[in-house]
Amino acid sequence: MTIPPPHDPEPSLGQLVGDIGKDLSTLFRQEVELAKTEIREEAGKASKAAGMLGGAGFAGAISAVLLSLALVFALANVMDAGWAALIVGVLWAIAGAVLYNTGRSRMREVSPKPEQTVQTLKEDARWAQNLTK
């Protein structure tokens, strides 16, 4: 019966380099998956904000037409129709400005940069630098 040689507890340089390569490959795949997830989440936020802006625009247009006509006709009973139409137009311009500013502020909440991925990539770079020292 032959006794097997004792197993060397120290891995070889080739094994270490291979392990580092596998670890970096796994790390890269995980970072790419994290970036995809973050981008999907931000795209969802952007699409919801765009939908709100579109809905606000449509509702505003319909409302503007119907209410403008009603208000112009009501004001035309007490003043010239031209002045009545001008007053109504100014009111809808103010409403449009408010809707625009609300939608723009919602769009500013959307971040095109995957923040978490950037942070983990910085941490990974520091980790890789410490490996080579």
Image (cartoon, rainbow, N blue to C red):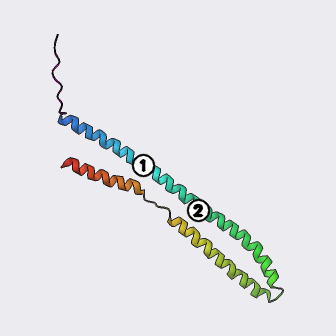
In the image, what residue type sits under mark 2?
A: Ala
Residue located farthest toward the top when viewing the structure as drawn: 1
Q: Which residue is labeled 1 in the image?
A: 34
Regarding mark 1 in the picture, which secondary structure is present there?
Answer: helix
- Residue 130 is tagged as none
- In this picture, is 35 found above or below 14? below
Query: Which residue is at a point 64% across and 74% down the rendered structure image?
Result: 96
- Asked if residue 9 lies in the magenta stretch, the reply is yes
Query: Which residue is at a point 61% across and 76% down the rendered structure image?
Result: 97
- Asked if residue 124 lies in the magenta stretch, the reply is no
Residue bounds of the magenta highlight: 2-10
Q: Which residue is labeled 2 in the image?
A: 50
Give left or right: position of 64 versus 111: right
Regarding mark 2 in the picture, which secondary structure is present there?
Answer: helix
Task: Measure the alpha-carbon separation of dots 2 and 1.
Answer: 24 Å
Local crowd size for mark 2, using a 10 Å CA cut-off: few (<14), some (14–19), many (≥20)? some
Residue 46 position, x and y percent, is: 54, 59
Query: Which residue is at a point 62% across and 71% down the rendered structure image?
Result: 99
Q: Chief secondary structure of the magenta span?
A: loop
Do the numbered discs 2 and 1 sit on residues whose CB atoms are within 8 Å?
Answer: no
